[in-house]
Amino acid sequence: MQEQIRQFILTNFLFTDDESQVKNDDSLLEQGIMDSTGVLELVAFVESEFGIAIADDELTPENLDSVARIVDFVSRKQQASRLHVGAR
């Protein structure tokens, strides 16, 4: 998952495949890698790629401002979804 997210960011926002251009803990917003429109592109990618739905109130830097935060957020969403489905 981490590599897929890194590659999406590198390809779509930095237009490179040079992995050294973004570290897992780099702030994507503070470094100007991604703006508000980029966040929407990222959300669309994450939702389709990992089968989750992201609510408007989840569009926060705490969830989406670095590769590491995105991976943690997606993992939590997937786990919650599996628990919800298993509870049925």
Image: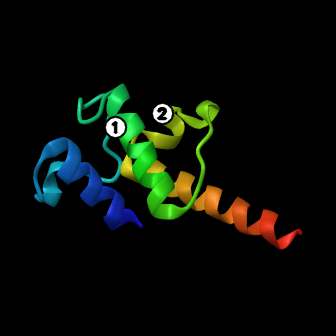
Distance of mark 1 from mark 2, alpha carbons? 9 Å
Type of amino acid under label 2: Pro
Type of amino acid under label 1: Ser
Task: Say above or below: 78 vs 42.
Answer: below
Describe residue 46's horizontal placement relative to residue 12 as left or right: right
**Image coords of residue 53 (percent x, y):** 60, 49
What residue would you read off at disc 2?
61
Q: Quadrant of the C terminus?
A: bottom right
At numbered mark 1, what does the secondary structure look like: helix, strand or loop? loop
Q: Which mark is residue 27?
A: 1
Residue at 12% across, 47% down: 15
Please say if the residues under marks 1 and 2 sit with CB atoms less than 8 Å apart: yes
Q: Residues within 10 Å of mark 2 (few under 14, many from 20)?
A: some
Residue at 53% across, 34% down: 59
Q: Quadrant of the N terminus?
A: bottom left
**Image coords of residue 31 (percent x, y):** 24, 31
Q: Nearer the viewer, residue 63 or 84?
A: 84
**Image coords of residue 14 (percent x, y):** 15, 44
Describe residue 61's horizontal placement relative to residue 34 as left or right: right
Furthest toward the bottom, the residue is 86
Mark with earlier residue (1, 2): 1
